[in-house]
Image (tube, rainbow, N blue to C red):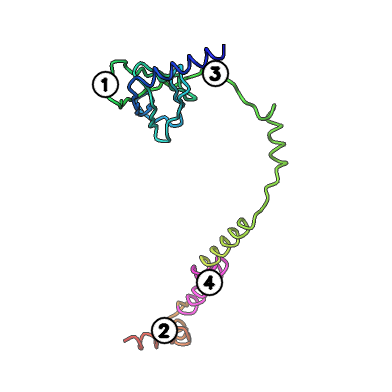
Amino acid sequence: MKHYLALASALLTLAVGAQNVVQVSGILLTSDTSLQTIPNARLWISGRPTTTTSGDDGFFSITAVPGDSIRFRRLGFEDERLWVSDSLNGTSYLATVYMRWNSVELDEVTLYPWPRPEDLNRELLRMKIETTERDVALQNLAIQALKEKASLMGMSSNEMQRYIIQAQEQQLYNAGRFYGNNGATAILGRLSNPFAWAQFFESLKKR
């Protein structure tokens, strides 16, 4: 029996060898409008052990003979066939093979990480977020940036408040001295005011 099988295999090999060998090359594309290339698809010839795979760019090349049927298989797609015409002349054949997506519709599933919202709140409170060295560095940089901005402002809020209060007190004091009940008191107050003299001399320097 083994001798008969070996003889049949040898005869089949001779029959194939007597036919014209064709180099079938082409590209695998999706059948939708996107026309994406399909990489790493498995190719084989029905009835013979010849097999190969498409490249990362979707191109393929396989040796066949006229009348062969080439099958294509890729996960996520339906199987496809390419028939090599038995009346084909020449030693090469170019083809574009389109494969359809194999869509599988699943039942809707709702995922709940915790049975109740209270469980979620409890787990969130239990979480311990570790402070990394990067976090500490970012905090230090933020504090330093605030200090630099504060230094550019000139005076702090407390200093600005004290300055306004002192200016108001000085204004009230000057009003009492310069604008008294009679003109003589106002003139004496003006002449005895050192700030007024300082302003006077400063105006002379600017002229």
The quadrant of the image that shows the N terminus is top right
Q: Read off the magenta span.
A: 151-178
Which-is-in-front pick, marks 1 and 2? 1
Q: Main secondary structure of the magenta part?
A: helix
Disc 4 on helix, strand or loop?
helix
User: Of label 2 and label 3, which has the lower sequence position?
Assistant: 3
Residue 90, horizontal then vertical, whole percent: 27, 24
Amino acid type indicated by mark 4: Tyr
Question: Residue 199's mark?
Answer: 2
Which-is-in-front pick, marks 1 and 3? 1
Q: Is residue 10 above or below residue 53?
A: above
Residue 189, horizontal then vertical, whole percent: 47, 83
Q: CA distance from mark 2 to mark 3?
A: 89 Å
User: Of label 1 and label 3, which has the lower sequence position?
Assistant: 1
Mark 4 — residue? 163
Residue 96, horizontal then vertical, whole percent: 33, 25
Mark 3 — residue? 106
Disc 1 crowd, CA 10 A, few/some/many (<14, 14-19, 20+): few
Instruction: Say if mark 1 contacts mark 3, CB within 8 Å.
Output: no
Residue pictured at 38% horizontal, 30% vertical: 61
Q: CA distance from mark 1 to mark 3?
A: 47 Å
Amino acid type indicated by mark 3: Leu
Q: Is residue 153 left or right of residue 122?
A: left
Quarter-of-image position of residue 113? top right
Q: Is residue 194 above or below residue 173?
A: below
Mark 1 — residue? 89
Amino acid type indicated by mark 2: Gln
Residue 167 on the magenta span: yes
Residue 147 on the magenta span: no
